[in-house]
Image (spheres, rainbow, N blue to C red):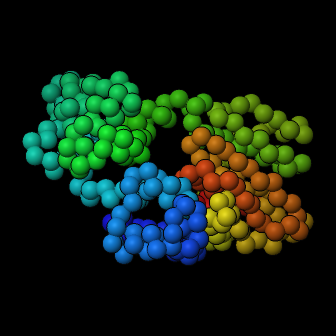
Amino acid sequence: MEFAKALVKARKEQGMTQEQLAARVYVTRQAVSRWETGESTPGVDMRKLLATSLGIPVTQLLDLPSDPVCQCCGTPFSVQDMPKGTEADGTENPDYCKWCYEDGRFTSSGLDELIERNAPYLMAATGYTKDEAVSFLGALLPNLKRWQEAKNENRSGNARRSMLYACPDCGNVAWSMGRLSLSCCGNPLEPLVARPADGALKARVQVIDGSQVVTVEHPMTKDDHLSFIAAVGTDLVRIQRLYAQQEALARFPLQGPCKIFAYGSQLGLVELS
């Protein structure tokens, strides 16, 4: 989706006016209006700030090509003379280009090295400055297959691999980045397994005054209430404890894209977004 349409869609989904968004990214309402009409376009760093303020992945605002791209460097395979990578036996790998993956091995050892190596090519293709090219690649590449897989190899270093626990007797909540042997009130605790909401819960996630606000429709009675709402991102996990006869609401500082979960003893763990 082109930038202007993506910006309008994300802003309206968050229930924000142009004035409210402008205040969050330190520009005028007129500047936001020009972006949304396509009269002008912001730079890469402003798009990052917009994405954070709207609580969406920055890739939604980067005008990425619709063609398949190398899942290591992000270069579209539609580029002239763009060869596919090869396995050790010479067979073609459909996910990576030859410049990134050859004879069954990646040609760059790390993300920073690849960004610095490819920035000049992006500058030549787009007219970006060096800083803009590095900023663009730094936003795009971590979302590609190679770097996602590399990040998830280290379970303890990725908060998205967190495990949540809840005691069925006292309601104590615990979390870990990796499986632990836990017990509470004499009960051995197993990691909670999330399921889709599937209409069981109706929730709204908004960005309000620089915070991510989660509101869930639930009766919150003594016998049936949510115990917590959690926001799980790449680097942070935040948990808001809830109690009976209290509004099912949580407010978290903006932390970029994250998954939202709610837990109740009767519902179990439900993924809201």
Measuring from the top left, give residue 176's x and y in whole percent. Answer: 69, 36
Residue 116 in picture, x, y percent from top left: 32, 31
Q: How many marks?
A: 0
Q: Quadrant of the C terminus?
A: bottom right
Q: Residue at (66%, 66%) from the top-left corner?
A: 208
In depth, the one of 245 and 88 nearer the eye is: 245
Q: Position of residue 267 (x, y in %)?
A: 73, 61
Of residues 149 and 14, the one drawn nearer to the viewer in this rendering: 14
> Relative to 142, is 22 above or below?
below
Q: Is residue 197 left or right of residue 3?
A: right
- 209, 55: nearer the viewer: 209
Question: 64 above or below 202?
Answer: above
Instruction: Tell me: 12 left or right of 82.
Output: right
Q: Is residue 167 left or right of residue 15?
A: right
Quarter-wise, where is residue 58 in the image? bottom left
- Left/right placement of residue 217 relative to residue 85 reads right
Residue 268 placement (x, y as % from top left) = 72, 56
The answer to whether residue 252 of the structure is visible from this angle is: yes
Task: Identify which residue is drawn at 47% across, 53% down.
Answer: 48
- Residue drawn at x 38%, y 55% is 43
